[in-house]
Image (cartoon, rainbow, N blue to C red):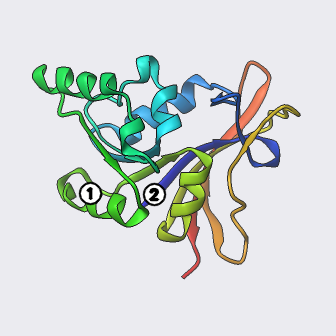
Amino acid sequence: MIQIVNIAKHNAIGKGGDLLVSIPEDMKFFRETTRGGVLILGRKTLESFPNGAPLKGRVNIVLTHDPESVAESAYAAAERDRAEGKQTELIAVTTAEEAVNAAARYPERGEPFVIGGASVYRELLPLCDTCLVTENDADDPEADTFYPELSPEEWRCAAASDPKEHEGIRYRFCRYERIK
């Protein structure tokens, strides 16, 4: 599995249920990288998407303590997408093992992506070998959601882009790989 995340200073990733920063090139990278793939996410992450709908053309596996809490409108949106030929799926599961098993039913869609939130990142990090991290220098003292630390004993930065900038926020794309 691959984790994909945008991290600010102090490993901050969110505030008040939203991303901490929105960088258009990062959003484009996310869309292109995950297009047609399998995503594992939490219920709150699903609810943060436009209209609380699953991401189109992807298998959206929602890891939640209560599958009944996934809004019926999210299932209806997936059904509408499929009617339009978009191959959108929405599956609710209660354990990491169920999420992994559900993802395994779609081998043709490649390795699954873990896309958040914080508790899902934390729970599935031990099962991942790669983390695609957009590191940015935003510093928001009101951040309330954080990504787990990638310890240098377990992870190495295998590749990094040149630094870029958007509206005063410096960022770079990094690929971390688990040290075998």
Question: In the rendered image, which quarter is residue 77 located in?
Answer: top left
Q: Can you name the residue that lies furthest to the bottom here?
A: 180
Q: Is residue 12 left or right of residue 123?
A: right
Location of the C terminus (image quadrant)? bottom right
Q: Position of residue 166 (x, y in %)?
A: 70, 23
Q: Position of residue 93 (x, y in %)?
A: 35, 52
Q: Position of residue 23 (x, y in %)?
A: 62, 26
Residue indicated by mark 1: 102
Q: Amino acid at mark 2?
A: Ile
Tell me the element at label 2. Answer: strand
Please tell me how crowded label 2 is: few (under 14), some (14-19), or many (20+) other residues with Cα within 10 Å.
many
Relative to 94, say whether 84 is above or below: above
Q: Position of residue 86 (x, y in %)?
A: 18, 27
Tell me the element at label 1. Answer: helix
Location of the N terminus (image quadrant)? bottom left
Q: Amino acid at mark 1?
A: Ala
Residue indicated by mark 2: 2
For marks 1 and 2 on the same chain, the one whose residue lies earlier in the sequence: 2
